[in-house]
Amino acid sequence: MILALYGAGAMGREFKQIADESGAWSQAVFIDDHADTEELSGCPVCRFQQFRARYAPDQARFVVSIGEPKFRREAFERMTRAGYQGAVLVHSSAEISPDAEVGEGSVVCQGVFVGSLAKVGKNCYLSRNASVGHDAAVGDHTRLGVNAFVGGHTVIGTNAFIGAGALLRDRIRIGASSVVALGAAVFEDVPDCVTVIGNPARISGDGAQSAVYAPSKVLESAQKDAEAAAKSIPERYWEVFSGCFEGVDFNPVSFHYHDSGWDSLTHMTLISRLEEAFHVSFRGREAMRLKSYADGLRMVRSKLEQTDGGNGQ
């Protein structure tokens, strides 16, 4: 039986190593419509239509070697619509309870633990040393990062992204298409389509309904970080502040907390974006002291001076 790896990148190479170790596959083939090579790790790389022309559904099984949940789902559905069935790749060092379930198309990497009566859905990716507690459920197309921990009876929705080192308490629910950032500690339910960060975790933005992990996203983010670092503090502050009030006409000099367009949700969003942009933390009741544009700018400058992170511009 042939194993098709949908995605000719680093993840595909890693999945091939798991497949090679198992000795269960006669040949591996990479599928990638955008690859700039015809060979990877000694295996052919072909486009989707080329693959369909060469291999019938009864000749091959597949896994999706793409990290981005949104694209994982799209690739999985494309293959299943064409009649192909997902494989299950499990590293020999993984520990899966006999009464646990792992859905088709899923990949379980080195050191993973899946507890009793746990259910891992279709097309999931469990990275190294991830743990899924007893009676937990991981939704289809979800990715668990390295060392992620899912407590017992916790339910994760479809198309979610759980970052490396994230800790999910037992008996909570993580919504569909949501992102738990790396290292986050989650103690309460998380809604659909949001990103949560920190300890304790709090909402900081949209979830995995848009791309959160594609290489292009990483490069774009790095470029923006470099551009932001070259700007003065007021310029960066203005970008963050104005980004929270799109479509609202205001004068930042005279803008205050109770003006039109400002509410508690906007306030929380502004705080989280300022923390992210300047790598500072507003603790306790500090956030409530941010009652105007000028107040916020003074607070950010003060915090940066305390950490020697500001240039005073």
Image (spheres, rainbow, N blue to C red):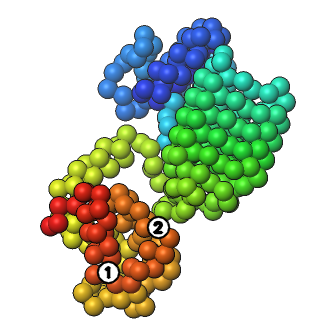
Mark 1 surroundings: few (<14), some (14-19) or many (≥20) residues within 10 A: few
Relative image position of residue 232 (x, y in whole percent): 17, 64
Q: Quadrant of residue 34?
A: top left
Horizontal arrangement in the rendering, residue 250 relative to residue 105 (left or right): left
Locate the N terminus by quadrant: top right
Would residue 35 appear left or right of 108 to someone viewing this image? left
Residue at x 63%, y 8% (from the top left corner) = 23
Q: Position of residue 186 (x, y in %)?
A: 62, 54
Q: Nearer the viewer, residue 190 or 287?
A: 287
* Residue 267 % position (x, y): 45, 77
Q: Which residue is mark 1?
A: 295
Crowding at label 2, few (<14), some or many (≥20) Cα neighbours within 10 Å? Answer: few
Kindly identify the amino acid type of the residue bearing the numbered disc 1: Asp
**How far, Cα to Cα, is label 2 from label 1?**
16 Å
Residue 48 visible in image = no
Residue drawn at x 51%, y 56% is: 197
207 displayed left or right of 310: right
The residue tagged 2 is 283
Mark toward the start of the polypeptide (2 vs 1): 2
Q: Is residue 81 shown above or below 264?
A: above
x, y percentage for residue 24?
Answer: 65, 10
Q: Look at 68% across and 60% down and name the residue there.
A: 189
Q: Nearer the viewer, residue 97 or 257?
A: 257
Q: Nearer the viewer, mark 2 or mark 1?
A: 2
At horizontal 21% and vertical 71% (from top left) the residue drawn is 234
Dot 1 falls on a residue whose secondary structure is helix
Q: Residue furthest front?
A: 306
Q: Nearer the viewer, residue 262 or 101?
A: 262
Quadrant the C terminus occupies: bottom left
